[in-house]
Amino acid sequence: MERYDFDQWIERRGTNSMKYDFAEEYGRPADVLPLWVADMDFRSPEPVLEALRQAVEHGIFGYSDAKEDYYEAVAAWFSRRFGWQTRPEWLVRTPGVVFALAMAVRALTEPGDGVLIQPPVYYPFFNVIRDNERRVVENELIYQNGRYTIDFDDFERKIREQDVKLFILCSPHNPVGRVWTPEELRRMGGICRRYGVYVVSDEIHCDFAFDEHTHHIFLDVVPEMAEMAVVCTAPSKTFNLAGLQVSNIWVPGEEVRSRIVGEMSRCGYFQLNALGLAAGKAAYEGGEEWFEQCRAYLRQNLDYLRAYLETNIPQIRLVEPEGTYFAWLDCSGLGLSRRALNALVIQKAKLWLDAGHIFGRKSEQFQRIALACPRATLRQAMEQLDRAVNH
């Protein structure tokens, strides 16, 4: 078995890295330590690198599309790891999940329609709704005793009263880290079916559920929604391939699929990135060993973060994540305003995290930190935060 070294520091500055090379363009000091965006500081699996070497050595990067073997590699992953059986005709390939969300919003709703989301939630959800002239309808998650749950009464009331046509589900939930139970998924799906609401389930973090929790594919739990639901997946988070722009969108309903593909055509999108296709196939076929080691390392990072906060910065509370490779930090114990909290993190601690308010208006006292980095980087971040808070 090959052992991967996730402690290895790999210099990313000077590589056009959005994470490392664009601090000043995003209004941050040049010397901040970035732990914000959802990509990893780990080199991708060796089978992926080898597939890319072969593609580069071939030297021709013409128009490309996927053959049946690509589908078989992806389908085998979901069958093996989730017990979910798919069909080739369900698969729609896009350059990213956010692009797919926008296509679904455009294809399945009309300007002025309500689209339901569950803040605090991944902030591009707001953008794909508003930028396409639809209305954001918010079903705020309930935060109580350090854990988030769904307000189902509000969920149904908002759908019924605010002309909701589409629900964007985040599963596992980013940034709060919930891995929804089958009961929660069935209840949400049942309400949506009752009112004829489409469901688009963003499951890009599906592979990152910690051992005591199990991720369940929405359509596997609620198969009766097959004609009304879309499941969005990608190798980008699982294998650190975001820059290669390939996502796998599962659309069992023929009419829904036709509408989404038609919208993609109207936007002028046809073929995927040739290197992304090669990398994605290689990742699903040969990247499992790397991924299991990576997930174990991330769990250790989470354990380190939890222990450090409890021992050194008890004013900041970890919202215990059940999945994803983010930690959602409750900073309300610091007693700071939104502006003062952001100044402490950015100017004093010299950290670039994601401020809570961008995920929802009730999250100004939170910060999101990405854990997909070498332990030494996380240790440095915690020490900088410790000094900023306590000295």
Image (tube, rainbow, N blue to C red):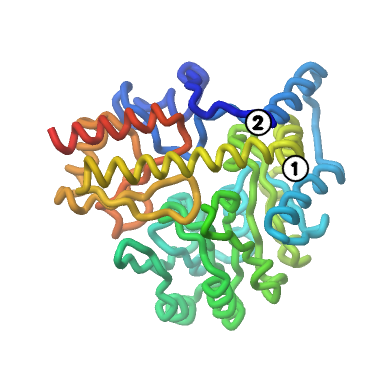
Taking 340 as reference, is 157 left or right?
right
Mark 1 Cα within 10 Å, few/some/many (few <14, many 20+)?
some
> The residue tagged with tag 2: helix, strand or loop?
loop
Q: Which of marks 1 and 2 is in front?
A: 2
Per the rendering, the mark at residue 288 is none
- Residue beneath the point at 21% across and 37% down: 343
Residue highlighted by disc 2 = 45
Instruction: Specify the quadrant of the image occupied by residue 222.
Output: bottom right
Q: What residue type is labelled 1?
A: Phe
* Residue lying farthest to the right in this orientation: 68
Nearer-the-camera pick, 338 or 142: 142
**Quadrant, the C terminus:** top left
Q: Label 1 to label 2, Cα distance in Å?
A: 28 Å
Mark 2 Cα within 10 Å, few/some/many (few <14, many 20+)?
many
On the image, the x and y values in percent for residue 101 come to 58, 54
If you read the primary sequence from the N terminus, does the residue marked by circle 1 or circle 2 appear first? 2
On the image, the x and y values in percent for residue 218 come to 62, 65
**Quadrant, the N terminus:** top right
Nearer-the-camera pick, 159 or 131: 159
- Residue beneath the point at 70% across and 34% down: 276
In the rendered view, would you say 184 is above or below 90?
A: below
Per the rendering, the mark at residue 270 is 1
Instruction: Specify the quadrant of the image occupied by residue 237.
Output: top right
- Residue beneath the point at 47% across and 80% down: 156
Nearer-the-camera pick, 145 or 175: 145
On the image, the x and y values in percent for residue 336 come to 15, 48
In the rendered view, would you say 37 is above or below 134?
A: above
In the rendered view, would you say 20 is above or below 203?
A: above
Q: Which amino acid does label 2 sit on?
A: Pro
On the image, the x and y values in percent for residue 187 come to 54, 77
